[in-house]
Image: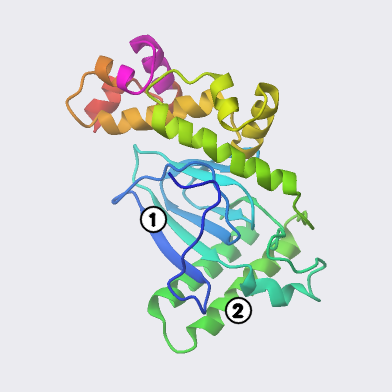
Amino acid sequence: MKPLYETIHNPDSSFPMKSFIRSSLYEHVFVHPHWHREIEILYVMEGSGFQQIGDNYYKICKGDIVIIDSGRVHSTYTDKEFQNDILVIHFSTKMLIHAIHPFFEVTPSIDNAIIGYSGIINSGMDTGRALVETILNIHREFEAKENHFRLFIRAYIYEIAGLIRRNLECTFQTSKSCKEEKVKEMLKNTFDLIDKHYVNDISLSMAADASSLSVSHFCRVFRKYTGITFKNYLSMYRIEKATGMLKNAASITEISFECGFGSVTSFIREFKKYKGCTPSTFRNRH
């Protein structure tokens, strides 16, 4: 499993950014909440899914732009029923650090919220349309790598920062507490527990113990960093495992127990809750 903190590997260490399209032709996105120092931008070119940023949980669909600032815990889950194509851009805060001072009214720090906004922007908005054009320009320059493409990409990144600062309400984060960073690291033990034992009964107290937190404290911080309760997250995780198994010949009953559900009835109920249809209907469609 990937830890809560993720290291982004860029193809060119001298130019810390990358752009690529993540397509469901190869894999659907289902990852545990994680964070990194790089700023992340997603543009949903096709399909739909759910996006978690901190303690906010959004439904995303074609045309949406997702802005995730440095250090924000986030996760993305695409709907397996549909084709999904998401343009992903990662760039280091170093790409903006020299522009932040004196033009931006924050102290430069690799661990600060640099771009000043995390959330969903619809491409139907004026700001959204301008952002889509700039995002696509970045991707085209990165793919073509024509002469001086790095200069153009850096300029487009500055343009994104300018559009956000000018048109969107920004709340800047000037520091991160050591306590918050410690909690992030502690939660990865709970995600590890889920990965290894989702087939078994995982109680709330077991999940809290894995992160060395009291149940009440665990419930608060888990919801803050995933956007949903532990119970709902575990159900969603199991449903995603079941979705993959429905492509083989295993029976609905076998799948329900192999994915950790106590009964076929509870499995069908939870499956309909997250997928909008019964497991049998889903299997027939695919």
The quarter of the rendered structure image containing the C terminus is top left
Q: Is residue 271 magenta?
A: yes
Q: Main secondary structure of the magenta part?
A: helix
Q: Which residue is mark 2?
A: 155
Q: Position of residue 69 (x, y in %)?
A: 64, 56
Quarter of the image for residue 282 reads top left
Quarter of the image for residue 39 reads bottom right
Examine the rendering and report whether any part of residue 58 can be seen.
no
Q: In the rendered view, would you say 285 is above or below 205?
A: below
First in sequence: mark 1 vs mark 2 = 1
Farthest left residue in view? 249
Say whether residue 259 is left or right of residue 110: left
Structural crowding at the residue carrying mark 2, measured as other residues with C-alpha within 10 Å and reported as few (<14), some (14–19) or many (≥20): some
Farthest bottom residue in view? 147
Query: Which residue is painted at 63% across and 32% down in the image?
Result: 223
Q: Position of residue 189 (x, y in %)?
A: 53, 36
Going by the numbered disc 2, the residue's amino acid type is Ala
Q: Position of residue 249 (x, y in %)?
A: 17, 26
Q: Position of residue 147 (x, y in %)?
A: 45, 89
Going by the numbered disc 1, the residue's amino acid type is Arg
Q: Which residues are magenta?
A: 256-272
The quarter of the rendered structure image containing the N terminus is top left
What number of labels is visible? 2
Q: Which residue is mark 1?
A: 22
Q: Which mark is residue 212?
A: none
Q: In the rendered view, would you say 121 is above or below 210?
A: below
Front residue (pair 170, 112): 112
Query: Which residue is painted at 69% across and 23% down in the image?
Result: 216
Say whether residue 29 is left or right of residue 66: left
Query: Which residue is painted at 53% across and 33% down in the image?
Result: 190
Secondary structure under badge 2? Answer: helix
Secondary structure under badge 1? Answer: strand
